[in-house]
Amino acid sequence: MDPLATSAAHWPLCTIREDAMALRIPTLRQRRLGAELRRMREQAGFGGSHLARLLGVTPALVSQMEIGKSAVTVARLHEIAEACMCANAPLVEALADMARERDSAWWDEYRATLAAAPIDVAEIEGRAKRLKSFTIGIIPGLLQTNSYATAVFASGFTPLPDREVGRRVNFRLRRQQIIRSGETPYMALIHEAALRIQYGGPAILREQLDSLVGDSDLPGVSLRIVPFATADFPGPSENLIYAEGPVPELDTVQSDSSHGSHIFDSPAQLAGYRAILERLEAVALPERESRDLIRSIAKEMNDKHE
């Protein structure tokens, strides 16, 4: 009888035990590793059962690895890459680094008290080699002041209790450490509309604008404004973060809409967002002119509300 038959009764005992191990609730990072393994398999033209036969495991284990519920060792990763004839050595090594990750990160402390979406954003930012963002009606979270962030959360469509607002604001401010420490280079592309919408009132906005000018001098931070006067506005209607990975294949886009947070990582989606950001950079004001525009809007508000 063929030892690779798909009937579970014929699988080696060690493989059955491997399948029966407790499944975890995967983090975003673990889900991404699994998704990349699935892409690797699909690019090789293999179905899950075929890859399982090549590896000597059950199809169920292949499925659980590809959705991040079963851990992938570095050795297993290399077996999959070899079986799928993946010749992209930089990608395989970057995936191996992901498989080696075992230490908890600061955002893991919040998994019991916050929804998954903000934790996913922190994980994307915290693992990025470089960050870009575009916002059209709001100052990006990585540059918000305490007062501004509080006003944003308090003005949501669904009212939040003060304690929940405080929890979310504290989490957002903690995310900012990666850029305030100079750890991760960051470009913020901000539409002029975001500089004029008064979350919490004019005083809070003036404080926020002054803070933006100061943050634009932080090492590794590039702040550029897309003005109303732009004739060729190529931007999307949603706010987005583009996080560069160790290789382009592991870049990630997170966007916000009225329907919630969305994450994109397919090659076609990443290429589309790269093109959008390139066009936005082409029409955005240079850094010095951007600071001048922020100062002029702040002065205009001071004159109006004195």
Image (tube, rainbow, N blue to C red):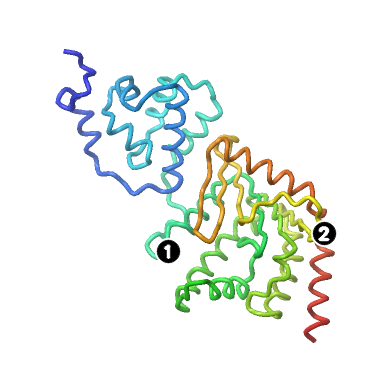
Q: Residues within 10 Å of mark 1 (few under 14, many from 20)?
A: some
As drawn, the label of residue 21 is none
User: Considering only order in the chain, which callout, 1 or 2, is on the residue closer to the N terminus?
Assistant: 1
Query: Which quadrant of the structure image shows residue 212?
Result: bottom right
Between the residue at mark 2 and the residue at mark 1, the CA separation in whole angstroms equals: 39 Å
Query: Which quadrant of the structure image shows residue 268?
Result: top right
Asked whether disc 2 touches disc 1, contact meaning CB atoms under 8 Å apart, the reply is: no
Identify residue type, mark 1.
Answer: Leu
Q: Residues within 10 Å of mark 2 (few under 14, many from 20)?
A: few
Looking at the image, residue 117 sits to the left or right of residue 142; the answer is left
Query: SS class of the residue under badge 2?
Result: loop
Name the spot of residue 35 as percent of width and height, x first: 44, 37
Considering the image in quadrants, where does the N terminus appear? top left
Name the spot of residue 297 as percent of width and height, x first: 80, 71
Q: Is residue 306 above or below residue 145?
A: below
- Reading the image, the residue beneath label 1 is 114
Looking at the image, residue 286 sits to the left or right of residue 273; the answer is right
Residue located at (41% from left, 37% from top):
34
Looking at the image, residue 272 sits to the left or right of residue 192; the answer is left
Name the spot of residue 222 as percent of width and height, x first: 74, 54
Query: SS class of the residue under badge 1?
Result: loop
Identify residue type, mark 2.
Answer: Ala
Name the spot of residue 45 as percent of width and height, x first: 43, 22
Residue located at (42% from left, 61% from top):
115
- Reading the image, the residue beneath label 2 is 229
Query: Which quadrant of the structure image shows residue 84?
Result: top left
Q: Residue furthest bottom?
A: 306
